[in-house]
């Protein structure tokens, strides 16, 4: 009887050990599962989003947003807001420098091209016209900038922003200056914004006191002028 009693107690103890081991294994498995789930979730959170394509606006004070309280109110910044509202995977880089001429832009472009780009919007020439720089020089510099971009990023989409100037320098000069943009767009088979300042140039209420640089409201119109052309290549 004593032996049998001890055997029964042994079986009970063994069963308790097995049950304890099973419970521990189950708890560890659930813990590992939870930790693995957390690791998986954290891994997903750390996964970088797909790289956005880059749109570079390369220009002068119009692109830079001269005189505005906030540069994001410039037409290039408004284009970024439009893109974001549509959920498009593009980021805008404002590469505008106030006072820039086409010669200055041609010197600066090499540095800018160190960063990759997918769409290049060229907005230069206005300061050339205001200074009476020969149209031949403006044409040469704009073409050189376009050539450098195409050579560095042959698959990039190029857009040229057309510009016009008042007839202060004479009608012949003004007409030749205006014609340069369409000539270059046709020659290079690129998109043309016919006149960036359409609806704004010459409108006092849409320009700052200097009569040259658009107000925030004026820039909204510029953004619309750009978007008409840009939306088709995004």
Image (cartoon, helix red, strand yellow):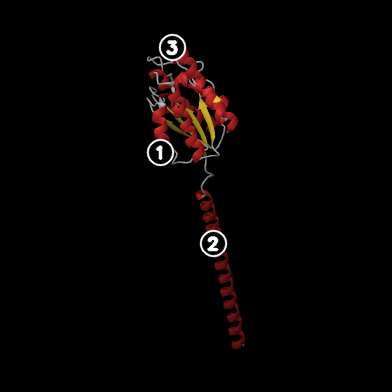
First-in-chain label (2 vs 3): 2
Pair 1/3: label in front: 3
Single out the residue that lies furthest toward the front: 136
Q: Residues within 10 Å of mark 1 (few under 14, many from 20)?
A: few
**Residue 27 position in % (x across, y down):** 55, 64
Work out which quarter of the rendered image holds the N terminus and state it.
bottom right
79 up-or-down from 6: above or below = above
Work out which quarter of the rendered image holds the C terminus and state it.
top right
Q: Residue at x 40, y 38 (%)?
A: 111
Q: Residue at x 52, y 49 (%)?
A: 47
**Residue 71 position in % (x across, y down):** 41, 27
Snapshot quadrant of residue 133 = top left
Pair 2/3: label in front: 3
Q: Which residue is mark 1?
A: 111
| Left or right, residue 149 beside residue 3 | left
Marks 1 and 3 sit apart, C-alpha to C-alpha, by 36 Å
Which numbered tag is attached to residue 32?
2
Q: Which residue is mark 3?
A: 170
């Amino acid at each position: 009887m004593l032996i049998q009693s001890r055997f029964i107690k042994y079986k009970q103890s063994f069963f308790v050990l097995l049950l304890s081991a099973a419970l521990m294994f189950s708890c560890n498995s659930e813990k590992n599962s939870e930790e693995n789930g957390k690791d998986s979730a954290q891994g997903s959170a750390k996964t970088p989003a797909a790289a956005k394509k880059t749109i570079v606006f390369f220009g002068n004070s119009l692109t830079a947003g001269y005189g505005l309280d906030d540069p994001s109110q410039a037409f290039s910044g408004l284009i970024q807001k439009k893109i974001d509202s549509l959920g498009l995977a593009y980021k805008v880089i404002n590469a505008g420098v106030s006072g820039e001429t086409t010669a200055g832009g041609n010197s600066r472009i090499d540095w800018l091209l160190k960063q990759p780009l997918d769409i290049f919007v060229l907005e230069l020439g206005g300061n050339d016209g205001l200074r009476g720089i020969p149209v031949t020089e403006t044409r040469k510099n704009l073409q050189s900038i376009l050539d450098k971009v195409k050579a560095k990023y042959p698959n990039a989409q190029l857009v040229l922003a057309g510009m016009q100037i008042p007839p202060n320098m004479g009608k012949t000069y003004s007409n030749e200056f205006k014609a340069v943009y369409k000539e270059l767009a046709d020659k290079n088979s690129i998109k043309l914004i016919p006149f960036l300042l359409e609806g704004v140039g010459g409108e006092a209420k849409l320009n700052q006191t200097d009569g040259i640089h658009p107000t925030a409201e004026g820039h909204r119109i510029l953004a619309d002028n750009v978007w008409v052309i840009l939306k088709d290549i995004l």
